[in-house]
Amino acid sequence: MLDDDAPRIRSYPREVRVEVLTREDEDLIHRRSLDILERAGVSTTNERVLKLLAEHGQDVDLEAKRVRFDPAFVEERLAMAGRTFTLAGREPDLDLVIDGERGYLSTDGCPADVLDLDTKRRRPGTKQDLMDLTRIGDALPQVGFFWQPVSANDTPVPVRPIHETHAQLVSTSKHIQQMTAIDGFNAKGILEMAAAIAGSTEAFAARPFLSNFQCAISPLHWDHGPLDAMELFAKAGMAVGICSMPLAAASAPVTMAGTITMVNAEVLSGIAILETLSPGADAFYVGYPTTIDLQSGALNPAWGAEETFAQMANTQMARRYGLPCTATCMATGSKASDWQAGVQSMLMTMANMLMPADMLTGVGSLDGDNVFSAVEMLLDAEIYDIALDWTNGFRISEEDIALDVILEVGPGGHFLDSEHTLTNMKEIWRTSLMNRRNWDAWEAAGRPDPAVAAEAEVRRILAEHHPEPVAPEIATELQRIVDAYQAQAVSEAS
């Protein structure tokens, strides 16, 4: 059972900096990123953005729908990005300050499927699943903010992002990072709901409890909708991330250096566009490089050193630019909460605590982001706790060395009943899910797996935890907005 005295959100320190790139490496990646944007450029189907960039002196080919960037322009736009902001919660004590000092963990997103708690089978996620998973995360101090942990497959595709945001707005008071709205229509509906909760568009802009990120399509393409959405969200006061998710050997070079550079170039292109659409917008860097399985051509579920190194390297590049950033820390390729899941989740989490981003994501996913598991979410939260306590470190002081206590106990004694032990015993990390029984007791209990304890905790939270609700009149207005946008989408489709 979770500690009732635990803080509502557990953050990690960002002063740790174990670098995987030299200064020469950083400079080379930066120069080659600018070369890519100047010589190859990026394509986009958004003609309005192409024309705007042409007005700003960039080399635009409207027929080919391609823009090549002047390196000086990219540097100029990069300098304009807002770098310090708050990911607000609906309650002020859930605010997450993004200023380079502390970092926060999120659920993963947005798998199509969920692992059913009762049948233990994979099935398509629903809006109710999204509400339940968000409610579980609302109860966990390890989860600082939310991506959409599963797709609401039972809602109409044209308005699914609005439904998914609605599901989370009524299920948590924590910050929500919207990642599925990739067009202006859904962005407008989401912003209407945000204004309804905040009281006005101005009130929401003052305390945005939503943020967003938009993804390039590797290699080097921006679709029409994401650029419209990023502009709307940025002008509403939301922080907007620029995401690159290439697959080495498929949508990026097979080498890690090439993949890291591809990520960097795509992120810089997005920031240049964002800061042209909305100068001064708060921005963050989202680098999600990975590899393919060269036998199947699919995403590699057995990832290891390459993905770990690339994540740390792209975080280091974001730090070079002074940009807030996001990295994944879990999202195992395993199909179950097993040895592989534990190894991959701990490997990536510990690595990302050595070069920590402002935001870490991935808690709860299986099968390489294809399936979300409430049980895995609890197990991943425990992994995060271990890594967080290790990164926070331990005090070394006269009081903590406790020389007087050692001298008092002396040879052959024990410290079990000393006042020092009673005062400080809660500082030792204690598992809530890993098995603590001795061998005989474990055998007598039927050899339980930690996943069994995690499932019991999931069921307890679902039975007992009730997030702060929105006011009834606001709930009614949110439903009205959802229904209105759904009706409009159906009408336009017919």
Image: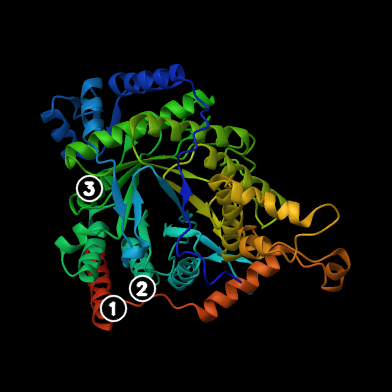
Q: Is residue 109 above or below residue 69?
A: below
Give the amino acid at mark 2: Val
In the depicted view, which residue is nearer to us: 130 or 443? 443
Residue marked by disc 2: 170
Please give the name of the residue rendered at 66% of the width and 65% of the height, measured from the top-left corner: 422
**Taking 295 as reference, is 216 left or right?**
left
Q: Quadrant of the C terminus?
A: bottom left
Residue marked by disc 1: 475
Give the amino acid at mark 1: Ala
Coordinates of residue 388 in the picture (x, y in percent): 55, 50
Residue marked by disc 3: 228
Real-space Cα separation, disc 1 to disc 3, in angstroms:
28 Å
Look at the image and tell me whether residue 494 can be seen.
no
Coordinates of residue 143 in the picture (x, y in percent): 48, 59
Real-space Cα separation, disc 3 to disc 2, in angstroms:
26 Å
User: How busy is the neighbourhood of tag 1: few (under 14 within 10 Å), some, or many (20 plus)?
Assistant: some
Q: Is residue 405 above or below residue 118?
A: above
Disc 3 element: helix
- Labels 2 & 1 near each other (Cβ < 8 A): yes
User: How busy is the neighbourhood of tag 2: few (under 14 within 10 Å), some, or many (20 plus)?
Assistant: some
Which comes before the other along the chain, label 2 or label 1?
Answer: 2
Look at the image and tell me whether residue 386 can be seen.
yes
**Residue projecting furthest to the left:** 55
Q: Quadrant of the N terminus?
A: bottom right
Disc 1 element: helix
